Structures are given as structure tokens and as C-alpha cells.
Amino acid sequence: INDVTTGRRHNDENSWFGRAILLFQPSDRFSNTAYIDYVEVDENGSRTRLSAVNTALATGRLLEPILNAQNAMLGFWEDESSYPNLLSEGENFGITNVTEYEATDGLRLKNIFNYRDISMRERSDYDGTIRSVLDLDLAQTAAQYSNEFQVQGEGLSDRLTWIVGAFYFRE
């Protein structure tokens, strides 16, 4: 959707994604796998365009004159700003580390650690009209940590497989 006031094109996509996996396995009994991921978003924001209203409802009757005026002066893929500087931007970075150790035949230790850092901001015009009805400015930041420790094994002549563990999460 093109904004006729600012000349900006909305609902564009400008994102960068990356992921790396590193495996360290010095023996058959020990392995360590690290997963690293990163996402960066820098876009012009989301915008909708009101194309129809239900005039049987009171809100539809209120929006009908706005829709008619908008349709008379704008093309279908055009909109006029009611909320300036729409954007969608942010970063999301994470690390997951999985360590596995086979202590004996039938007994394994496993640790799963995760860290995630999120910072996002979204300014959007969701009502699809030239009025400021549903314009949103949302921001989110979070740092998350989690760890899971497991003891795994077999018993009863390999007829039973079991896992005992503990989990921790903090945001």
C-alpha cells in the first residue's frame, strides 16, 4: 500500500536472518552442540486499507462516509496517512547449547541451556482509514534464560526408558 501523503510504500519486507550450528564431539560419549540465531527487521510498518463496511451495524454507518470519501480520492493500493512514521523494527538474538554425556551404558546426562534477547517496535495503522481509529505503537523488550538438566536411562532389560530432570526459566 502506498501512502499518498508521505510517498512511503508500506507492508514492505526488509529482514535479515542468520543461523549457525557448531558441533564439538571429542568422543562417542560426549557432545556439545551450540545453536546461534539472529533476526533483524527494519521495515516501513503495516498498514491496511478499508475496502467495505457493514452498514447494518452502527460502526459501519459511522465509517461509510469515511470509506466513500477515501474511495473517491484514492486508488485501491493507495492510502492517506493518519498516523505518521509507521515502522516495524527490531532484533531477536538467541543461543541454545546442548551438552550430552553418556556416563555408562544405559545412563546419560543432558543439559539444555537457552538465552534469548528480544527488542521489537511496531507502529501500525490497522483501521484502514484516514482517521486515527486503530493506530498502534507497540514495543517489546525481553531477556530470557532457561536451563534443563536431564538424567536419562534404561532399565528392566531395556524394556523401560526413563527421564528425570529439572527445568528453570527466567524472563
Image (tube, grey):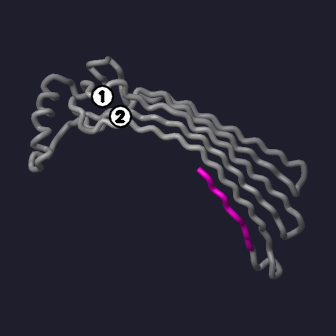
Kind of residue indicated by mark 1: Tyr
> Dot 2: few (<14), some (14–19), or many (≥20) neighbours within 10 Å?
many
What residue does disc 2 label? Answer: 124
- Identify the residue at horizontal 70%, vertical 44% (top origin): 35
Q: Residues within 10 Å of mark 1 (few under 14, many from 20)?
A: some
Give coordinates of residue 140: x percent, y percent.
Answer: 48, 40
Up/down of 16 relative to 57, above or below: above
25, 126: nearer the viewer: 126
* 94, 72: nearer the viewer: 94
Q: Any mark on residue 46, and which? A: none
Q: Would residue 82 be found to the left or right of residue 107 on screen?
A: left
Whether residue 78 is visible:
no
Residue interval drawn in magenta: 162-171
Nearer-N-terminus badge (1/2): 1
Q: Which mark is residue 83?
A: 1
Question: Magenta-highlighted stretch: main secondary structure?
Answer: strand
Answer yes or no: do the residues labelled 1 and 2 have beta carbons within 8 Å? yes
